[in-house]
Image (cartoon, rainbow, N blue to C red):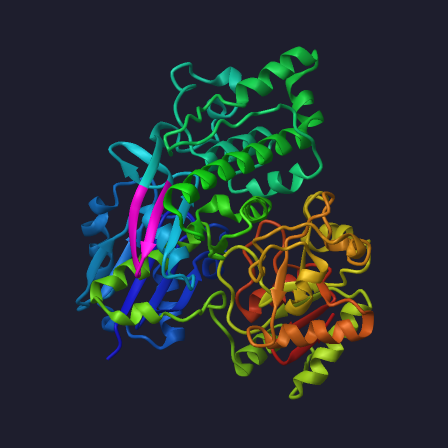
Amino acid sequence: MSNISLGIHMGHDRSVSVVVDGNLVGCLATERIDRIKHSKSSVIPFKTIDTLLGYLNIDVHTIKYVGITYVSVEINNLTKYYEDQLKDYYPNWNFKIIPVSHHLAHAASTYYTSQFNDALVFVADGGGDLINGEEESESIYIAKNNILYLAEQRCQSNVIHTLTREQFHLYPFMNDKYKQYQVSIAKKYEQITYMLGFAWNQAGKTMGLASYGKELLNLDIPPITNLNFNLSLDFLVKDIYELYLASGIRYQEYITKNRADIAKTIQNFTEQLIISIFSYAINKYGIKNICVAGGLFLNCLLNHKILDRFNDIKLHICPAAGDDGQSIGAAYIAYQYFNDTKLATRKKTIPYLGLSYTNSQIEKALKSHNLNYKYFENTTLQCKIIAKEIYDNKIVGILTGRSEIGPRALCHRSILANATWDGMKDYINNKVKHRENFRPFAPVILKEFELEYFKLRQTSPYMLLAPFVNENYQNKIPSVVHVDKTARVQSVTQNDNAFIYHIIKEFYKLSGTPVLLNTSFNDNGEPIVETPSDAIKTFLSTEIDVLVLENYIIYK
């Protein structure tokens, strides 16, 4: 009988993961099931558990250990609370709950999805669990022989866990007592995101906007000698307020006028501070295999700057670097209670760990919407047709294989388009995605061409690195080149992603360019589509021209 552990994350970005005999076999974010973006609740996502276990054909009663995580709590105090919920829902189940701290779960999610034995693991997020009344902010772990050891940790004030209130991101509202309270690096980035008028979990917009600006302030970062550095609530917020006072214009006018420059200032500060911390940690611990996790490392500009600065390291980032990856870490930590040596030979299974759909399920969804469709037994012919549609500037929504983990669509639930047409970015932003025009789209490229087109320091399969585009190709793929001449790259291989690989290869034959535009298959404000029905609804409600559901092609 197999050894099976389950990981469950509650809070925001709830998710569920399963480890069998030392290997991650499934991970599903609750937002993909309940269709609520960043699905947030203290309740266990039972429907997500049932859906994933049903897909994997696993009886919950065969699972022995259950890892649980939350955020901004003392997780050990919640063991009985969640044990009662699980026993009420699943009667006669004999299991043991393993409470896992927030940062340990992040660390485990990235280390155990890497292929490293020894690694330096760095976690940086908005905030983790409570340690003596303070909240985890940045942590360094040492990983060796499948065990994680906490080496250093910085904590922040838990009073300001939520930054949406004006007294935490607008200087005139700030309580004097709070101004010197410590915040995490990611929370500082989030704080400025609110100042710019963006909402919760929209730091990606700040990152996109930063490329249009220049630094407002020259922020010298002192050398880091330990993790106990000073980063106060009023830092930068006060400086920006003083610049506004000197400007002679209204506050909101000043922010609007300097929006891109403010975004650039926080982006540069974050990059410089993280690089200083990495320099300290790499020198101290002498480890060149680096794993990172936490929402801060969804910042693909930052990630590639790390590689630019430290060209002798190997960097691994779990695609689910945010809290939707918590359940992965929880499942792995829970699995260790088997004391099973199979963990030492774990396989690479990321990133396609969600659900897939049969032809009968797809046909049922198509018929329920009275859609005409074509079925292709010959996928070679199908790929040629899809590539020709993209070449003719048609927008193609695609659902294939198991859904990907993390917030970035990695071509299994993607919208694909022609990267060579310079009007494509604005067209999709306006007509399909309904989002701000300053937000860029990503290129997906055949792996054998990625170093030719992009100044990458290492391969980029998960859209988590944004290198510069090589000059001679910038004009050839204009719709995926950002204003700063970077691009958020995903490369694909025939082994890992055969269907998408062949579509791009057929497009390459037509256009001479082995690159497509790739963006997530969803409308603005919605989770990425999961089911064929989700895909059909988005197809019908947007200006997507062609829908591909596995072997089926559907036209408007």
The magenta stretch is: 139-151
Indicate yes or no whether the magenta region holds residue 146: yes
Q: In the rendered view, would you say 297 is above or below 411? A: above
Question: Would you say 264 lies left or right of 37 here?
Answer: right
In the rendered image, is residue 255 in sight?
A: yes
Indicate yes or no whether the magenta region holds residue 358: no
Task: Locate residue 214, reporting x and y percent.
Answer: 69, 31
Relative depth, front residue between 475 and 141: 141
Q: Residue at x 82, y 54 (%)?
A: 475
Task: Locate residue 492, reporting x and y percent.
Answer: 61, 68
Q: Residue at x 41, y 74 (%)?
A: 55
Task: Locate residue 23, reporting x and y percent.
Answer: 36, 70
Quarter of the image for the N terminus: give it. Answer: bottom left
Question: Would you say 371 lies left or right of 178 here?
Answer: right
Q: Residue at x 58, y 17 (%)?
A: 241
Relative depth, front residue between 197 and 220: 220
Would you identify the image quadrant in which residue 537 lies? bottom right
Q: Residue at x 46, y 61 (%)?
A: 33
